[in-house]
Amino acid sequence: MNRKPTSTIDLCRIGAALAVAMLTLACSIPHAAADNVSDPKRWCDDATKLVADKSILELIDRMAGDSNGWLEKSVAAQYLAGLSPVLSRAGKNLSSDLLAERRYGEALARFWYILVFEKGAFYFRCEAIKYGDHWVPVGVHFQSDPSLIGLP
């Protein structure tokens, strides 16, 4: 019987698990700003570093704190629950790079990243919407299949 070693990560299977970790916030009216985000790219760069460092609890805190009241910490934790086990099996982070950046008008910004680990690569999309003079991160998406992350 040809079986892969249990230590090998099958990225096709992980894609389904990471889809569960996808977070999209769709609230219509934001609450008063808690922490103002002035630069969505810097926020997304920092979020990417947290994922690369496997600091998912800190990412959950940042997402909830910077969500403008849209996201409770418990909801963020639920959406990202599958990410920590996957990252723990991925090995050491080798690199991360910004793949693309798109601004849609003045109000929407999206950023795509690749995170390369010893045992596989993951794709990360981060998006933010501008409300007045500050930005609100409204979604993070993870995939192991680049065709499923919406690269431009």
Image (tube, rainbow, N blue to C red):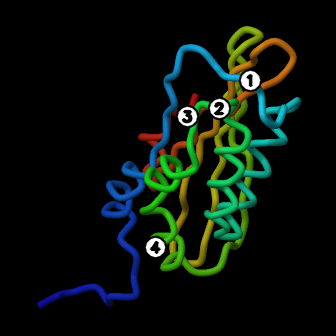
Judging by the rendered image, the residue that carries numbered circle 1 is 32
Judging by the rendered image, the residue that carries numbered circle 3 is 151
Residue 131's label in the rendered image is none
> Which residue reaches farthest left?
1
The reply to whether the C-beta atoms of the residues labelled 3 and 2 are less than 8 Å apart is no
Q: Answer few, some or many: residues within 10 Å of disc 4's Cα (few below 14, many 20 plus, some between 14 and 19).
A: few
- Which quadrant does the N terminus fall into? bottom left
Residue at x-position 55% and y-position 63%: 121
Disc number lying in front (3 or 1): 1
Q: Kindly identify the amino acid type of the residue bearing the numbered disc 3.
A: Leu
Judging by the rendered image, the residue that carries numbered circle 2 is 69
Q: CA distance from mark 3 to mark 2?
A: 28 Å
Q: CA distance from mark 3 to mark 1?
A: 32 Å
Disc number lying in front (3 or 2): 2
Judging by the rendered image, the residue that carries numbered circle 4 is 85
> In the visual, does 147 lie left or right of 98?
left
Q: Position of residue 52 (x, y in %)?
A: 68, 65
Q: Quadrant of residue 100?
A: top right
The reply to whether the C-beta atoms of the residues labelled 1 and 2 are less than 8 Å apart is yes
Q: CA distance from mark 2 to mark 4?
A: 28 Å
Residue at x-position 49% and y-position 24%: 26
Q: Kindly identify the amino acid type of the residue bearing the numbered disc 1.
A: Ala
Q: CA distance from mark 4 to mark 3?
A: 25 Å
Placement of 43 over or under 103, stated as above or below:
below
